[in-house]
Amino acid sequence: MNIRNLMILLVSCVLATSAFAAEKKKPPSPLTVDGAVTVDAAQAKAHYDKGVVFLDVRSDKDWAAGRIKGAKHLELKKKYNEDSLSKLVKKDEGVVIYCNGSPCPRSSQASAKAVGWGYTKVYYFRDGIPAWKTAGFPTEK
């Protein structure tokens, strides 16, 4: 193999690797969800202290590893639907929806669905469980 062919092969490998890496990288969740109020950890904690329902939409495995103390769980892809949500909270009651922070799209998707179903007090906790833990707020397993 001559130098030219070797260079072409090397460049092809680099380009293929870069394309694969770009494909695997997930965009962060949106900053806002139309019809929902985005809250940070301190604002979420204020709702928590008022007794607002916290809804974890992470996977069953993530839920089992630890969660916000007292949160309810509806796995987004398996159990989250209008009927299951209505069993936890009324459409005019508050609900704080969270997942694994900004890299995780589940809380934004669940918040958008809740708004679409007519829920009027949806709090999108974009920073989710990582921010909650960093703040030292109550968790459980």
Image (cartoon, grey):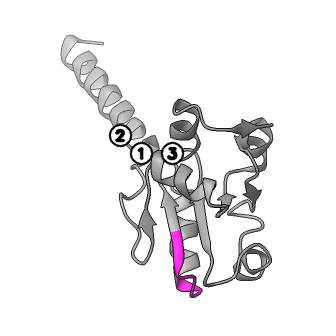
Start-end of magenta stretch: 116-122
Inspect the magenta stretch and tell me whether residue 63 lies in it: no
The residue under label 2 is which amino acid type? Ala
Callout 2 crowding tier (Cα within 10 Å): few <14, some 14–19, many ≥20: few
Q: Is residue 15 left or right of residue 48?
A: left
Left or right of 73 in this view: 23: left
Image quadrant where residue 89 sits? bottom right
Asked whether disc 2 touches disc 1, contact meaning CB atoms under 8 Å apart, the reply is yes
Find the distance from the CA under tag 1 to the CA under tag 3.
20 Å
Q: Nearer the viewer, residue 60 or 6?
A: 60
Mark 2 highlights which residue? 19
Q: Quadrant of the N terminus?
A: top left
| Front position among marks 1 and 3 | 3
Q: Position of residue 26 (x, y in %)?
A: 44, 47
**Residue 91: quadrant of the picture:** bottom right
Q: CA distance from mark 3 to mark 2?
A: 25 Å
Q: Nearer the viewer, mark 2 or mark 1?
A: 1
CA distance separating discs 2 and 1:
6 Å
Residue found at x 80% / y 77%: 87
